[in-house]
Image (tube, rainbow, N blue to C red):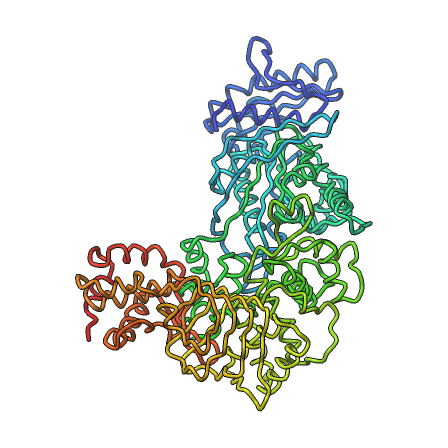
Amino acid sequence: MSSFEFEEDVRRVARALWPSAEHGGPEIVNGREVDGVFDTEEVSHMVEATMDRRIDKAHNVGPKLRDHLKKARARGAFAKAWFVTYHPPTADQRKVLHSDYDRSIEVVSYDQFRSKIVDAREYLRLRDRASWGSASNPTTNSAVELIKYVPLGIAVTAGALRPKPGHPRKTSRVAPIKTESSIAEIVSAIESGANLALLGDYGAGKSMTLREIHSRLRDKYLRNESHRFPITLSLRRHFGQEDPAEAISRHAHHLGFPSPHKLVNAWKSGFAYILLDGFDELAAPGWSGSTEAIRENRRAATILIKEFTREAPPEVGVAVAGRRFYFDSLDEMGRSLFDGSPHLIASLSDFTDEQARKFLGQFENSEGGALPDWLPVRPLLLGHLAAEGVIHNVAGSEGLAPAPGWDWLLSTISERESFIKQGVDGVAVRTVIEQLAGFARQTPQGVGPVTMNDIVDAFTVVRRQPPSDRELTLLQRLPGLGGEEDDSEKGTRRFVDIDLASAAQAAHVTRFIVDPHGDYAGFDPKKWNSSMEPLGIEVAAHQLATLEIPEGQIRKALDRAIRTDCGELAADIVRIAISLDIDLQPSGALSYSVTNAIIPSLDISEGGPDLSGVDFTHCLFSELIVSGDPAIARIPHFSSCDFGETIGRLGESDMPADNFQSCDFAEFPDAADRNAAIMDASILPIGTRVVMILLRKLYMQRGSGRKDSALTRGMSATDAALVAPALRLLQREGLVFATRQGKNKIWLPDRSAGPRVRAFLEAPRVGDDPLVNGSKGISS
């Protein structure tokens, strides 16, 4: 900060302290320049500001300050003289001014001077002791002592400008900013006066990022690098408020800050930034089901934020954080939060692999652990997994298999939502998500769109009563829900997190198997459009295994699904039986006939259950995986079925004709393709070829992980014998790890190793990657 900038900051504080002297400033008095004279009706203030710590400065300004006081006393007026220093004034400066010139001269530091507006240091101290929105420490559950912030990717765009006709738009500066921005650039934009919306999905780190912005602005103020400090409100405490001054006062009372009115005045005078966390946690009374009524409810719920942006001084912007899909569109958000004024939109990305590892380094025994490909790399979910110690124990750990992992995560996410919206417990939140996921199965993609009425119906089914106004906020911010362009006008939502939807859809199938004759509200499998994704099947199998449901119960449920003509449900149960290694053989005249079902994936394995009693007719399979060499007598029969990818077989002639009648096959990825080309490449050592094929199967092919028996498919006996040592090499290098799903051993890739794997596959004979020499050393 230059001397001129410091003097201007001191004058800015003086004008805020003495508003009636707002036009005061530098003057020439008795032929000498004075930094500032501010005359109110009662008192004439003379101010001298300096960054100089030498005693000469006191001698230089002492006569001016003394004469100002003498003249005022001579005419019977009140006057004050101020000597304001950037650093704490020295003892010598204070002694000279008081003993040589006038004892009534106020000798103060800049920090003391500006604290007369508001004791910002005390506010900031108290604020640091309070919670930060929905952020919490996953290890201790503390909402105050949080873990260290790890920067996320931030994409920044300019928001649309749509002022109301005839309504003057408040002007505010929007600083130039890169599309991909750092947290420092976001802070600079706020300092320049820009309005900002910080957006992200559930668990993306919005509150943590806003806290980091607060911390950086706080530190600049405490270092005297800025005359403004941050005031950060958690909006969940301001339900129903519309007046910014009232909101700041309530915030001050909550913290125990003794002078709420001073905090309000500091903001109105341009000495404070406003940061607002959780616009998606606001609701307004009076709701009806129409799309426009819901939008009007959101406009009414967020009026406090709009009033903050309207009343903020022109040079001070407002930053607000919340979930992107609380609003139907960014246009609606801009009008609701910023009244059409210029604003920036900063969208948080998931962690990169490097950021995820840096984040995990804060947790005991988690640094260096593998990152399973299925794991969502968001701060919330990674933090909870690390705090539970799940990430560290990788090899052979069922805790890192996708099914138990997602089952646990779904409960964790739901508990967090219930904490944010107290009054609806975590079990109820999860059940609402599961019910809505069941509704989503009625749509072509199985993830939506769903209307707000569907969301409310899901809540009503679970709670047996419509949502209250406050519960409505929970429904408008359910985790995993988002939208596409078509959803903007219709006000619909869909599951953007497909894995979350799949995990949630398992619940209805699990419940049906437990009691196939139960009467469940909101359960209508005849309307389902498709069988579940593989993750949903594995989650249901995990739940049933945990409940220790007997095999006979699963067969009874399958028979009930077929008798009630629920093809998608029947397909689900067959696939669950496969996962649990339950035989489905014909029993007398009884067989299990699944018809007209759409099935994302079916896995038939060597050593798997006997499925000879299952018939698929007129079904559509996106993927058929044949692992190893299952006995023909133990596999299902397929009639007039269509298959997308058939993995593990070389071509149609490789399919047993008696089991696949009048079937069409679109693609065989393992047919005379690059795998075969690799094995025929005599220029490469045999060990290198085997390692390359394993990496291609695990990293480059569709799906998450491969069964142990699938890795040798298509290899000669000599090559297959090298798979075990090749896997040991890949394990030592941290590229693969094993887990279990039921009795099956599953090999999973480490998501962070993708670039390394691709580099090796492109140049397997050169470079300093240990795989180059390590794979050469594998031989028969």
Relative height, residue 183 to residue 398 (above, below): above
What residue occupies the far bottom of the structure in this picture? Answer: 588
What residue occupies the far front of the structure in this picture? Answer: 662
Q: Going 37% across and 65% down the picture, which residue do you hit?
A: 698
> Of 335 and 704, which appears nearest the observer?
704
The quarter of the displayed image where residue 498 is located: bottom right
> Of 234 and 704, which appears nearest the observer?
704
> Of 765 and 222, which appears nearest the observer?
765
Residue 721 in percent (x, y) is at 26, 77
What residue occupies the far right of the structure in this picture? Answer: 286
The quarter of the displayed image where residue 736 is located: bottom left
Q: Going 72% across and 62% down the picture, which residue do you hit?
A: 458
What residue occupies the far top of the structure in this picture? Answer: 31
Q: Going 19% across and 66% down the picture, which residue do you hit?
A: 685
Q: Is residue 52 left or right of residue 98?
A: left
Question: Is residue 112 in view from this perspective?
Answer: no
Q: Going 37% across and 77% down the picture, which residue do you hit?
A: 628
Relative height, residue 530 to residue 322 (above, below): below
Residue 57 in percent (x, y) is at 49, 23
Relative height, residue 694 to residue 76 (above, below): below
> Of 178 and 778, which appears nearest the observer?
778
Q: Is residue 761 left or right of residue 249?
A: left
Question: Is residue 375 in view from this perspective?
Answer: yes
Relative height, residue 458 to residue 301 (above, below): below
